[in-house]
Image (cartoon, grey):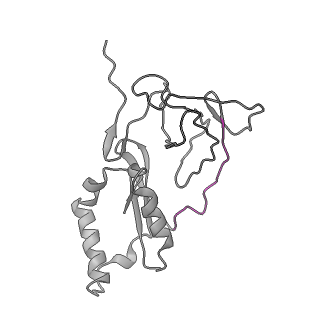
Amino acid sequence: MASWQDQGLHTCGTLEGWKKIQSNDKWLECHGRKKWAFYYLPEQVEKQRAFFNKFLKGKTDTGVERWPKVILEIRDGFYKGKFREEKEFPLARAEYKRLYLDAPGSLSTNLPTHERSTWYDSLASGPGRHRSEFDITFDVETEITGYMSAKLFMESPQSDDMHVFVTLWKLDKNGEPVGMTYYAQVFSPPVKLT
């Protein structure tokens, strides 16, 4: 069991562990819900019981063999998504695209023609310049499922240490963040008071 929403803590380790398990008797279910709430749903507890009954107690009638090897929740927003059966993970049919950061804030399929830079105040919080953001708009419906990597060239002129977090946000047509669960929390856009 893995959760898309726990990317900063357990998602990577769970997916890497699953990939490296040598046994053919392995299954993966990846969801975008609050991890412990989903894990302890009655139907999930029953799946765990069936798995343990088969592999720890040696029972042969648990139905585990008929489970799909992979089930992925493809998310649209907070608790909005569809579970889909797959044969493998990562998806063999995935199409990897190279995207380029172009300061001050775009993400593009085109290699930038000039060297540029962006900066932010890493000690700041709240509104203001405390992160660098790069936007891309997809002209066609696009699903992002699986692994990503980033190659960044960075410097910290007033320090000899740096922690970097790269986050992907889904924005609606008005540029507002689409609510998702993350780190067992709920992210929703700020309420605008009039």
Q: Where does the N terminus fall, quadrant-wise?
A: bottom left
Q: Does the image show residue 16?
A: yes
Rendered residue at 73%/37% (across/down): 110
Residue 73 percent coordinates (x, y): 42, 54
Residue that lies at the very extreme toward the right in this rendered image: 113
- Residue 85 visible in the snapshot: no
Which residue sits at x=39%, y=53%? 9
Magenta span: 88-101
Residue 52, quarter of the rendered image: bottom left
Q: Is residue 72 magenta?
A: no
User: Which SS type dominates the magenta stretch?
Assistant: loop
Q: In this view, does 108 lie to the left or right of 170?
A: right
Near-viewer residue (182 or 142): 182
> Which residue is farthest left?
42
In percent of width and height, residue 22 lies at 49, 79
Looking at the rendered image, the quarter that the C terminus falls into is: top left
